Every structure is written in structure tokens, then in C-alpha cells.
Image (spheres, coloured by chain):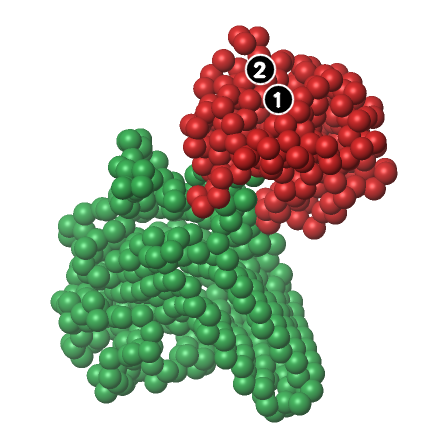
Chain colours: A red, B green
Amino acid sequence: MADQLLSISGLSAGTEDKPILHDINLSVGAGETHVLMGPNGAGKSTLGHVIMGDASYQVTSGSIVFDGQDVTAQAADRRSLAGIFLSYQAPVEVPGVPLYSFLRTICQMRPELKTSARKFRERIARISDQLDLDESFLTRELNVGFSGGEKKKIEMLQLLLLRPKLAILDETDSGLDVDALAVVSRGIEAYRADCDGALLVITHNTRILERLSVDHAHVMVKGRLVAEGPASLIDEIDAQGFGRFEGAGEKAEA
Amino acid sequence: MSETTTPELDERGRSKVADVDRSLYDFKKPEEGYERYGDGLTPDIVRAISAKKDEPAWMLEMRLKALEVYHERAMSPNWGPDISGLDLDHISTYVSPQTKQAQSWDEVPEDIKDTFERLGIPAAERESLAGVGAQYDSEIVYHNMREEVAKQGVVYTTIEDALHDPKWEPVVHEYFGTLIPMRDHKFAALHYAVWSGGSFVYVPAGIRLDYPLQSYFRLNASGAGQFEHTLIVVEPGADLHFIEGCSAPKYFEANLHAGAVELFVKDGARLRYSTIENWSKNMYNLNTKRATVGAGSKMEWVSGSFGSHVSYLYPTTILQGARSTCEFTGITFAGATQDLDTGCKVILNGADTTASIDTKSISKDGGINTFRSSVVIGRHAERARASVSCQSLMLDDISRSDTIPAMDVRCGSASVGHEATIGRISDDTVLYLMSRGCSEAEARSMVVNGFASPVSKELPLEYAVEMNNLIKLEMEGAIG
């Protein structure tokens, strides 16, 4: 498994009073695109957050190895600097922090992205253009007063700026209108093309996947991975729903 | 900033820093050879201060009268933070460096000059100020103003000097002590008995200053008081931005600051009064500030308070003239051992007057913030409007934040509004910022700086930078 970018083995995790994830095994190779699907409440977002290092969840067993390093005990900032990125379903508003200086700060702290003010400005301009993002956004406060679609664009902007090795997109498509969805899809494509990074797309809407070439699909039910397969699995789910997997989740639990 | 060593960890593995690094402010200079009057307060000390300043008879009478009032009054205030640690019998009311007031930094004694250089005052003067006054303990050691400003008839000097000028002595006499009467409270009486230093500013009608004037107050002596008096008259149609900065090194003995600020803003004028206060945490800051505002005029307060052990501070604005306005923007930061009782008072007397009060407070490590606001709308203040907003940020479970708004509305056509929120830094926010590479400490100070930014945006640049640095210092190592 030395060639795997992300290897999760035997991972169980949850909150203090409630186990959520059970014995997860999942591997993502460099540059691969994986999709994680499942009904609401299956634990998909939790898995995304646990990979990122969200301290509100505790890992009770198993390990997460990223890029050859065991990151199971690492805090989120260390994982971010190592190359993991999580695009949030509901990005947090941070009043009083100007978006532009925030973006500058998170780039300057990475040796590989450190650059002059002028070159940085040019990079931002190029990416904003790719995402159809009005540059007046950059003077506003981080995510404050942005619409759902605008917030997702800001997430894509950070994704393209930070060039992570692995991007986890948590329901990035939820609540977007057709135009915004098209922009986000363009952002994901740009990430695949420019950064050659791996993707783990968490979704229950297959439309965002139409323009992506998916390598593997995973199905999660009740905190367990119950099926894994090629891209054709997505079409199957599209046609039949999760019904046939739900029994599997219960069986596994029993 | 000095090198940080490996922080001590508490039982939950969080780093713990006993006291923040205040080395930027926390340097002491010897007071050898200084003139220091005995502790406590007697008519002899008051006479000695007055004689040294060679004051007109009316000022000495006023001082002696104030001393009587001071002795008559019971120890007060008795409704806010505890001030029992303040033993007035052991506070020196007058400590003077033995130097003449200079107009050039080269004439200021080396150690005092070094103090102000480390605080960045001469550099700011060269770059962005119209004039500077610098007070060290009880006396102003430096005062200077750009020539072109002086040519416009602007006066920026000490009250002592103004009292020796036949042209300005009657002006000081007319205004001094009229807005804050000596009977206001015990510490106002104390102030008038022993006041020393401060500034007198006079801006003639129609003159608008392009650059601010700035006074910096430094209390170097231990166990001493600073009692400066600031008197500003802005004549009709004139415009002034005045900045005051205060700091002191830390001592174990209590220090006292009981200054008075009297601001007279005439019709159609504007005054912006900015303060950044970073007294050390042994300071009792019992300061009184008041402004009276004429028709169509504007009074703006911008205030950042970080220091002192105990503060009682409620700048007051009297909107006397019709259509006058008051804007108050303030922030207080209370850490360990700090009990800061601050706020703002506005009295709206004129018709169509407006007041907007916007304050923020940050509490951590057991610090206590109490915000008191008082809005009084008089009987004749038709259509007056006032809004008060108070936001508090608590950084842990052991700190405290209270909001005590008072409103007294005596005019039917007036309207008032009040909102208060108390919040914490959410885990979601910290995670979001950490997942973009910020450390937990960086994430927290980013949130706190963001919270404070509506105030820092209003401060002059070098003070905004200083305030951000102060927040960073206060936040460093404060994880959990």
C-alpha cells in the first residue's frame, strides 16, 4: 500500500457519547477520484471531518495514514499543511477577517506557496476569473453575508490556491443552483487538471459527478462502508436508490 | 518580544502562560534625583505643587477647596469593582523628573527620551502628527507643534504654560473645571487638588487640522498617581483629531490615574478623541472624561482599553445643540486580575440629536468586563435618536462579562434602541481556520482580531497596529 496517498484501516470514531463510524477501511491513490455516497445520516460527513482532524470526534481504534505518515493523532492544522483539504458543507463566517488577507496568510505559511505580494495578486486574479468570482468579494469579510453558492465558490478558491494532495468535498453541491453548480464543477475540473490531486467527493447528488471521471465509488450506511465499486455503481444508485444497501448496514451491525 | 520557552502545560495538556510578555511597555527607569512629594495628601503638598507651578491665586484657591471636598467625601465609588487595594495615604501625588519642558527631543534627558522612543512617539510625530506632548510622571517633558499649525492660531500647550500667558490665562479660567465639577465624585476632587500636566488645546473658528495632535502619558514612578488635565476648546466650524496614549511599567505597589478631560465642541465643529490605554495591571484607572457639544456639531470617541487592574471609565457626551451627534466606538480587553468597569454616557438635550454607541469587550483568564451605558433624553430633545450596541466575547469559562444599560427617555418623539450579545469562539470556527493551516493559537487570535476590527479600523494606523499586537500578546500561549 506504499503507493496509496490515503490509507484508512480499521477506523472507528464518534463523539464522546455516541459511536458513529465502525471499522472503516478506505484507500485513495494519488490523483484518484473517489465518491462517497449514502443516505442522510450515514456518517459520510463525519468521515470527512475525521480525516481532516476535527477534534470534536474521537478515534477509538484504527489509523489514518496520509502520504506515508500516520496522522491519526495530528491536529487539523498539521494535516492541512501536509496536504489534506476539506471543503465544508456549511463554511463558517468569520467576522472582521478580510478574505484577501486571510488567503494571503494561509498561503504565506506554506513554504511551497510563499510568494511576493504582486505574484499572489496575479494568482488570485487568475483563479477568481476561473471561478467567475467578482474580485470585489476579496475585500469582504471571510464568508460573512455570502450566499450559499458564494461560500462554495470561496471554498473552491481556497482549494485552487492551496493545491492540496487530497481534497475532500463535503456536499459541495448541496443547495446550489444550476449556474453555481457549473462553476463548482469547473473548479473541481481545474483542481484535477492543475494540481493533479486526489478527490474524495461526498454527495448524494450525482449531477456533480457527471463531468468527473470517477475511479471508485463507496457506499456508506449507518457508519459502515457496505459497498465499493467502479463508477457504474453510481448509475445503479441513481436508478435504484440506497434501498438494497440498507439491509447490509443492519446485517453488519448485528 | 522576548524568546518564548516551552510553555508549562496544565493537567489537560493545554499550555499555560502565567503573564503575558509586556516587555514592550514593561521597562522601568530609575527615578534618582527626582522631586517626589510625600505620600498622602495635606494642604502643604497642595500649596507646594501650586507654588512650584507659580500659579494664579484662583487656581490655588480651587485646589485647596477641592482638597476640602476630597476629605469630606466618603471613599467611593462603592458600587463597582473593589478599590480597597488603593491606599491613598501611600500614593505620591507628585513626582517630577528634574528637567525643563523641551521643544526638541535632543533636549529631553536620555533615559526619558529612550522611553518615548521605545514607545514610537518621535517616529509617529515625524510621520503623521501635527503636534506632540509627552508627559512623564507628573510633568510634561516635551511639547511641540508644527509651525504651519501654530501660524493658524492653534494652541497646543500645557495648562501650566497657558496659565502664564496673559492671553490664555482668562480662557483657561473660563473653562477649567466647569464641565467636570470638583464635587462630581471623590476622585474628581482629588484631581483638582493635585492636578499636574496634561494639555490645553485651542482651535480657532473655522480652522481644520489635517493631522492629529497627540499626547502620550507615561507613569514611570512606582506607588504614584498621575493627575493630568486635558482641556480642549474647538471653536465654531473647526475640526480636530486628538489622540491620547497611556502606559506604565508594572510594579507591585498600586498606582493611581485620576485624570480629567474636558472637551468643549462649539457649533458646527467636529472633535474626534482617540485613546489607547495600556496601563500596567497594578493601576487603578479612575478617569473622568466629558464633552459638551454645540448645534450641528459632531463628537467622536474611539477608545481601546487594555490595561489597568481596575477601571472606572464612562466618557460622557452632552449633546446640547440641535442636530448634534455623538459616535462612541470602544473596546476593552480584560485578562487575569483585571476588573474593568467601562461604558459611555450620553445626554441628549437638543432637538434632532443622535447618538450611536458601539462597544465590544473581550474577557479571558478570569478577567471581568462590565459595560454600563446611560442614555438620557431630555424633555426638549424632539426626535432625538440613540442606539446602543454591546458585543462581548468570552474566551473561557472563568471570565465574566456583564452589560448594564440604563435609559431615561423624557421626550415622546424620541427613539432609543439597545442590543447586547455575548458570545464565545466556536469550535467550528477554530476547526475551519485550522483546516486551512492556522495553528489553534493563530485561529483564536484571528477571531479575536476580527472581533476587534471595527474598533481598530477607527484608530490611527500606528495605534491599530499596536492594538493588534496587544491582542496577539494577550492571546499568545492562551490555548484552551
Residue B109 vs B38, above or below: the answer is above
Question: Residue B178 falls in which quadrant of the image?
Answer: bottom left
Given the image, on which type of amino acid does mark 2 rest?
A: Leu
Measured from the top left, where is residue B314 in percent x and y? Answer: 44, 71
- Read off the residue under disc 1: A166
**Split into 4 quadrants, where in the image is the N terminus of chain B?**
top left
* Residues packed near mark 2 inside 10 Å, few (<14), some (14 to 19) or many (20 plus): many
Residue at the disc numbered 2: A5
Residue extending furthest top?
A2
- Answer yes or no: is residue A179 visible: yes
Image coordinates for residue A150, horizontal then vertical, percent: 75, 41
Q: Residue at x 26, y 85 (%)?
A: B73
Marked residue nearer the N-terminal end (2 or 1)? 2
Could you tell me if residue A209 is visible in this image?
no
Please tell me which residue is depicted at 73% across the width and 36% down the height of the picture.
A243
Q: Is residue B26 above or below residue B321?
A: above
Residue A166 falls left or right of residue B40: right
| Residue name at image x 68 percent, y 42 percent | A40
* Left or right, A188 with reference to B99: right
- For label 1, the SS is strand
Residue A116 image offset from top left, x and y in percent: 61, 23
- Quadrant in which the C terminus of chain B is drawn: top left
Residue under the image location 29 percent in, 79 percent down: B78
The amino acid sitting under disc 1 is Leu
In which chain is the residue bearing label 2? A
**Closer to the camera, B428 or B42?**
B428
Q: CA distance from mark 2 to mark 1?
A: 8 Å
Q: Are marks 2 and 1 in contact (CB under 8 Å)?
A: yes
